[in-house]
Image (cartoon, rainbow, N blue to C red):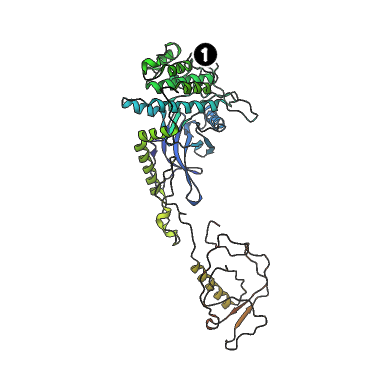
Amino acid sequence: MVGARLFEPGTGRQRVDRYELVGEIASGGMATVYLARLGGVGGFQRFVAMKRLHPHLQHEKEFVEMFLDEARLSAGIHHPNVVAILEVGASPVGYYLVMEYVEGDTLARLLARAASKGQRIPVPIALRIVLDALSGLHAAHELKDDQGVLVNLVHRDVSPQNVLVGVDGIARITDFGVARASSRLTSTRVGQLKGKLAYMAPEQAQGDPIDRRADVFSAGVLVWETLASKRLFKAENEAATLQRVMNEAIPALTRVAPHISKELASVVHRGLDRDPTKRFQTAAQFADAVEAAAGGRDGVADPRDLAAFVKATLGTEIEQQRDAVRAWIARSEPSQVGALSPPLAPSSVSVAAMSFSDGSQSQANSALTGGFRPQRSRAGLALVAFLVAMLAGGGGYFLARSPHEAPPPPVVAVPPPAQVPAPAAAPPAAVVTSTTPVTTPDALPSAAPALTLTAVPVAASRAPARPAAPRPAKKKKGEDLDVRNPYR
């Protein structure tokens, strides 16, 4: 999200298991959310959001169980309008959840930004956001266990703060930290309220048993406020807020927002009915009614329109965030100039390629851009030096060489001539024969006959230079492996 406070790069880089913490996104009473990076082979990296339980709550059983419940419940929901849980773990610094990172901002901040300019979010854009949120909410309500039985999940904290609007044009519901299900590991204490009072259904606020219809009411508050650009129940204090939720008449949406059609306003007010039996029974029913009512003059934007709106509203902040992250990576990557092989330029490993949800990419190159090609000439010189040393010592040596390498000029390894005598003009050849089987590398045949290594003077064995054959795409069994290539 926009506005992550990046940590100071350097030697004190913070890590949690496989993840490197880049900055802090937000902090609440139960946990802190970080921007984190997962690296891998070949310059791979992925940015995620890590939610970590506060250290002082690590030994509080109730909070730990609630935290783990969120992971267990959310991980089972697979829907494009729900922020995905990728991993849950425990490290020396405590429990953490790894979530999909959504580049964008919350609906609450979009509403606040528009209000600060004396504007409203355009109705088609607002309807796209609320329809996405209702779709994700319905997917959560339909969650089933391994036996195919509904777990009767209730989010209990549906609010603009828990709807993320991405630069990809998709709105997602998030934060199931106070969710409740019939299969929940923990139970809520009697008389204990969880969630935000200004978005609670009346039955939830007074502690009665609740089901998915309580979330439908909360979604009704969200829709009303998004269209009106005004708070519905929020008051000076919690007591006054609770009084409004329970008893105060709900203002007509057409009076607060005259640009809204009567059909759409009627749908929103049905979602806000204080009698659970009279409001929509599911979030899907609510979404269908909103979409049908908006088919007239209001209209519903498509994801491309929403993406364009987010970029127009948050584009400057998003680019600043991206530039800051790129700079952070550039400063925090350790220098590898002295350890690099000549084919790799120092700049090619300083910053890995960084992609974002809208498809844009940084100009920095990964360490593998253009591929890794070891230099064969150096390998040939090393083999020549090793062979000469072995010949001088009188030991046997089994030489396995790629057929595509040019023969080393000073010394040639050839099979012993069986029937053809050596040329008369050639001086006596020094012959070293090994009769002991030699252990071969794993990539070569396990049993190999002894070879005779003949040192022939250069003048008698020099052949016209041949161009090197092109490097094969794939090595065959029995060929030498280039041990300098770490990606074999």
* Above or below, comparing residue 371 to residue 85 in the picture: below
Front residue of 353 and 48? 353
> The residue under label 1 is which amino acid type?
Lys
- Which residue is at 39% across, 37% downward? 4
Relative side of 382 to 114, left or right: right
* Above or below, comparing residue 131 to residue 88 in the picture: above
Residue 110 location in percent, x, y?
A: 38, 29
Q: Please, which residue is most extreme toward the front here? A: 296
> How many labels sit on residues?
1
Q: Please, which residue is most extreme toward the left here? A: 117
Kindly state the secondary structure of the residue where label 1 is placed.
loop
Quadrant in the rendering for residue 300: top left
Quarter of the image where the N terminus is located: top left
* Above or below, comparing residue 24 to residue 127 in the picture: below
Residue 211 location in percent, x, y?
A: 55, 19
Residue 74 location in percent, x, y?
A: 54, 31
- Which residue is at 53% across, 25% downward? 138
Quadrant in the rendering for residue 35: top left
Quarter of the image where the C terminus is located: bottom right
Q: Is residue 177 visible?
A: no
- Which residue is at 50% across, 67% downward? 376
Relative side of 277 to 170, left or right: right
Quadrant in the rendering for residue 104: top left
Residue 58 location in percent, x, y?
A: 51, 32
Would you name the residue on which mark 1 appears?
278
